[in-house]
Image (cartoon, helix red, strand yellow):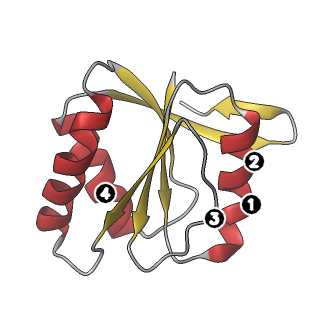
């Protein structure tokens, strides 16, 4: 399964994203990130998509959809981490994914490892 993560400006949540990325078994990873956030991880199977969180929510949704669609062109479902970011960014990302369309399974890293929470 492929992983889509949102990376906002809230650095206190980066360890959650880092653990999920490094300890999960992902075919591909797409990190949708606020363009002002520092890049913190890279790899062969990791794509980073910078977005402008200052846009309106509808414009933000369209920007995310346009940038993610080529990366998820054959996926029916993705694992989704919303551990970082704001509600506006999360809503735009979920709406963009559903519009591509792909299904979503919420995922988190816990003391028990990678767990799906839906």
Question: Percent position (x, y) of residue 114?
Answer: 72, 32
Residues marked 2 and 3 touching at CB (< 8 Å): no
Q: Choose top left, top right, bottom left or bottom right for residue 64.
A: bottom left
The residue tagged 1 is 15
How many numbered marks appear?
4
Measure the C-alpha gap from mark 2 to mark 3: 12 Å
Residues marked 4 and 1 touching at CB (< 8 Å): no
Mark 3 or mark 1, which has the lower sequence index?
1
Whether 8 is drawn above or below 107: the answer is below
Q: Which residue is rendered at x = 31% and y = 46% of the image? A: 94
Mark 2 or mark 3, which has the lower sequence index?
2
The residue tagged 2 is 19
Mark 4 or mark 1, which has the lower sequence index?
1
21 lies left or right of 46: right
Question: Percent position (x, y) of residue 18?
Answer: 70, 53
Q: Nearer the viewer, mark 4 or mark 3?
A: 3
Residues marked 2 and 1 touching at CB (< 8 Å): yes
Q: Residues within 10 Å of mark 1 (few under 14, many from 20)?
A: few
Q: Which residue is rendered at x = 74% and y = 60% of the image? A: 15
The residue tagged 4 is 91
Measure the C-alpha gap from mark 4 to mark 2: 23 Å
């Amino acid at each position: 399964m492929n992983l889509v993560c949102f990376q906002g400006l809230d650095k206190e949540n980066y360890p959650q994203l880092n653990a999920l990325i490094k300890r999960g078994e992902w075919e591909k990873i797409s990190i949708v990130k606020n363009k002002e956030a520092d890049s913190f991880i890279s790899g062969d199977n990791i794509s980073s998509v910078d977005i402008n969180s200052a846009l309106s929510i509808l414009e933000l949704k369209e920007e995310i959809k346009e940038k993610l669609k080529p990366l998820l062109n054959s996926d029916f479902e993705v694992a989704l981490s919303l551990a970082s970011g704001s509600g506006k960014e999360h809503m735009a990302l979920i709406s963009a994914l559903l519009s591509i369309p792909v299904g979503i399974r919420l995922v988190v890293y816990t003391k028990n490892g990678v767990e799906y929470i839906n």
